[in-house]
Image (cartoon, rainbow, N blue to C red):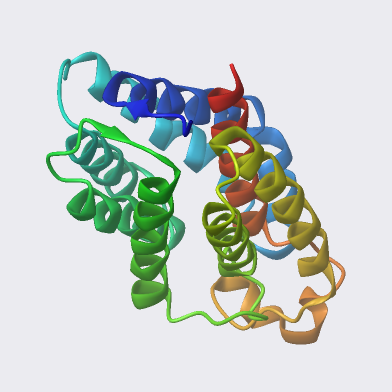
Amino acid sequence: MQMIVTTDRVRSIICDIARVMDEQKQHLDDLDRAIGDGDHGSNMARGFGVVLQKLKDTPGTDIGDLFKIVAMALISNVGGTIGPLYGGMFLKASTAAKGLTKVDLPGFVRLFREGILGVQVLGNAEPGDKTMIDVLLPVLESLEKNCAAKVSCVDAFAEAEKIAADCVKKTKDLVARKGRASYLDEHSVGHIDPGAASSHLMIRAIGESLAK
């Protein structure tokens, strides 16, 4: 039987993502310092800190509303291009999740697909550009495959996390074609993309939260 994830469980997942971003902010800042402004982790932690406060003030809502809260907090409080990109991801997913109070793995995949579409529309990034897309698209493909095979939600995200971790490492060999890192051109090779790294952390947090 497929796991059914309720609104309250989604709220818990978001809180777990916020915790991980806060724990890993120094690591993400260090990655960003090599090819960016050095504040990716601090920005993500600050944005999700606002998310936590907003969630405390908004009890008893549907999944779409929760995603919209995340989107607005990230867009307003995360600097650079990454805030609008992550915010756009949650905003696009919030439209697809409007009115939903529970979701299974196929539903998760549909929301994830919509969210990635939001990132691609805003960022205009393609695979190989050394961005979060280099993690998110392979994760989506993995989730779609396991959804079709009727794999459990927990196992599907466990596999997706492994793929995300591998994809993050592969960004080290790519030339940045988007964002501030693109100014470095060939000199961006040898460094992991911080947006790809935070995307992996997000997938990891979701998987660990579902496995609780």
Left or right, residue 66 beside residue 36: left
Q: How many marks?
A: 0
Q: Is residue 63 visible?
A: yes
- Compared with residue 10, is residue 40 higher up or lower down, i.e. above or below? below
Q: Residue at x 15, y 25 (%)?
A: 61
Q: Position of residue 53 (x, y in %)?
A: 29, 19
Q: Position of residue 12 (x, y in %)?
A: 41, 20
Q: Residue at x 60, y 33 (%)?
A: 154
Q: Residue at x 35, y 73 (%)?
A: 122
Left or right, residue 138 beside residue 92: right
Tell me where residue 126 sits by quadrant. bottom right
Tell me where residue 66 sits by quadrant. top left
Q: Is residue 39 visible?
A: no
- Compared with residue 53, is residue 207 higher up or lower down, i.e. above or below? below
Tell me where residue 103 sits by quadrant. top left
Q: Position of residue 132 (x, y in %)?
A: 58, 63
Front-most of 81 and 160? 160
Q: Residue at x 58, y 37 (%)?
A: 152
Q: Position of residue 176 (x, y in %)?
A: 68, 78
Left or right, residue 19 beside residue 5: right
**Which residue is farthest front?**
1
- Compared with residue 187, is residue 61 higher up or lower down, i.e. above or below? above
Left or right, residue 193 beside residue 136: right
Q: Split into 4 quadrants, where in the image is the C terminus? A: top right
Front-most of 104 and 20? 104
- Compared with residue 55, is residue 119 higher up or lower down, i.e. above or below? below
